[in-house]
Image: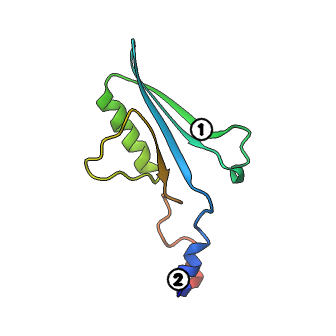
Amino acid sequence: MQTPLSANLSRYAPDVDHLLFYKIVPDADGIRLRIWESATDLDQSPSPYLYILNFRVSSMAEAKRRLKAHLALNGGTLSVGQELPQKGKVKLLPHPTWDGTEGMEDSY
């Protein structure tokens, strides 16, 4: 059974998952970190991605710190102590910066 509040919240949930992809590659000049988010049909993007970030960092630890910070800002979550492989993808939460009240003024 849906309550009026849960029915109202469901309109904010996307129909498709947003995935954030990343790759950490050691090379002669240090470590390269590449992060990108795939586009969906709803995004109407001319590219297969919404954005790509390229970083050059000095260590694997720094690459993982930057990746975890980017995930936190974009609605990706990791378990405590979860290790990140050098290549992967993470499902992003919808509306990571939504505070739970925007658009809800009429639901109370």
Q: Are marks 1 and 2 in contact (CB under 8 Å)?
A: no
**Residue 79 seen in the figure:** yes
Using the rendered view, name the quadrant where residue 38 is placed: top right
Using the numbered discs, state the Cα–Cα distance from disc 1 to disc 2 in whole angstroms.
Answer: 34 Å
Q: Secondary structure at mark 2?
A: helix
Residue 39 lies, with reference to residue 86, above or below; the image says below
Between 22 and 9, which is closer to the camera in this rendering? 22
Q: Position of residue 23 (x, y in %)?
A: 46, 32
Picture colour scheme: rainbow
Read off the residue under disc 1: 51
Along the line of sight, the residue nearer the viewer: 12 or 78: 78
Residue at the limit of the structure toward the left, as seen here: 81
Q: In x, y percent, where is residue 65? A: 33, 37
Q: How many marks?
A: 2
Q: Position of residue 21 (x, y in %)?
A: 50, 40
Q: Is residue 82 left or right of residue 35?
A: left
Which of the marked residues, 1 or 2, is nearer the chain's N terminus? 2
**Helix, strand or loop under label 1:** strand
Residue at figure coordinates x 62%, y 72% from the top left: 11
User: Is 4 located above or below residue 23 in the figure?
Assistant: below
Instruction: Identify which amino acid the numbered label 1 is placed on.
Output: Tyr
Residue at coordinates 44% horizontally, 49% vertically from top-left? 73
Rendered image: mark on residue 5: 2
For label 1, the crowd category at 10 Å Cα-Cα, with few meaning under 14, some 14 to 19 and many 20 or more, is: few
Q: Amino acid at mark 2?
A: Leu
**Residue 104 image offset from top left, x and y in percent:** 56, 77
